[in-house]
Image: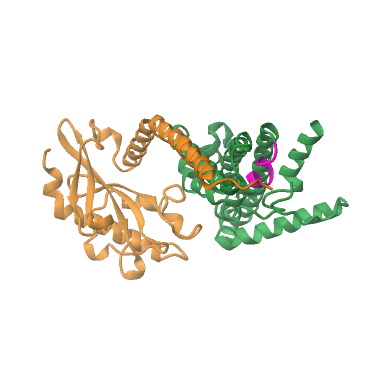
Chain colours: A green, B orange
Amino acid sequence: MSGKYGQIVKDGLWENNGVLCMLLGMCPTMAMTGTATNGFGMGIATAVVMAASNMMVAMFRNYVTHEVRIPVYILIVAANVTFVDLAMNAWMHELYKVLGLFIPLIVSNCLPLARLEAYAAKEPVLPSLMDGWFMGLGFTLALTMIGAVREIVGQGTLFADAALLLGPSFTFLETRIMPADMGILVLILPPGGFLVAGLMVVAKRMIDLAAGKEIKMAGAHSV
Amino acid sequence: MSTIRPTWVHATILGTFCAGFGVLLAATDIVTKEPIKDRALEDKMNSLGQVIPKSIHDNNPVADAVAIPNPHAGGHGGVSETVVYRASMGGKFTGFAYELDASGGYGGPVKLMLGIDPDGKLLGVRVISHKETPGLGDKIDAAKTDWITRFTGLSLGNPPVEKWKVKKDGGQFDQFSGATITPRAVVGGIRNGLEFFAANKARMMEKK
């Protein structure tokens, strides 16, 4: 059994990474990676929604008929997003002020829906929960890395405003690597998102090649 | 893969899910409604605190607010009102704060919060939200530079109205290198805000 969960972790974080392999969820990837902190926050919010949605779909998988499964999945994702949205607004308001605008974007993110269809609809509750969580963490990893590159090169900082997101004890994460004037502005602007995301995909493939792995053309529906 | 079932089966399943999640969402809404309202009030108090010093009032300005018609407010659906929050000390008004949109920003209107004392002098100005270019126009944000604090203490006569412009337009306020449009919008917005105060001072001073 541990082999199965090990595979889920590896797939989610690296082998079948939602952003770097499947190229899903590009909308939040572009919109929320201006800084590493924003990428991280968006990623964690998505991971929570994915874990909860995967779990619910797995629970109900024997009761939902094939014909109406898509509307039910969308309903479940949308309901979870609304729970997270309301709960964050009420009890994690500082975080909400940073991410609030982007939480509703999770509904239109293909990644949760792809995992519901490809994994949670067929597998038991616990593996589905794990799959959602680790796919979400892989998403977080990719967004944080893209955000870090854009932030360092674009405005010379790393994890700016981390304390706002994680609490005052994380102020040590906020670093200035070079003066703001040296930043290359285009990387903070929308084209920078595409450029850095593309370079990240290339970098991942080169790492895989160097490790002697075959480049598999991962698709949304590979399990 | 699936056997053919009559439509009502699918409809019942979908309907049950919709009803079930509808109930859950309604419950979440009820539970979070009050905290969300409190947070919105706190936000308002915080942004007010930046333009009206806490030391000059002993009331809650959010509770003592008046809506004043403002044809330039550009509200939704034809409603053009500016809500003025009034600070008072011992029953005497000591400051007024209101939001306004400075039009003409590079990325749309720049939302400002103005604090003005009863003599028409600016207690403070803050940018609440904007969509200006990061690294260029966003220097108007108090978190980035202290540019916006230069307006504190100024009024419509100081400098004279014709000098309420950026230097490039013959006024007295510095633009930043690489960005003239944003400061021009902000300076113009503050001037409009001061003129709004001058025109509506009597109404703002009315007791409830």
x and y, in percent, of residue B156 in the image:
21, 56
Residue A215 in sight? yes
The part of the chain drawn in magenta is A115-123
Q: Is residue B140 above or below residue A159?
A: below
> Is residue B162 rendered to the left or right of residue A149?
left
x and y, in percent, of residue A141 in the image:
67, 44
Kindly identify the residue that appears in the image at 23 percent across and 58 percent down.
Answer: B78
x and y, in percent, of residue A111 in the image:
62, 49
Residue B73 in sight? no
B47, A24: nearer the viewer: A24
**Magenta stretch contains residue A121:** yes
x and y, in percent, of residue B137 in the image:
45, 59
Residue A60 occupies quadrant: top right
**Magenta stretch contains residue A190:** no
A13, A69: nearer the viewer: A69
> Is residue B151 rendered to the left or right of residue A178?
left
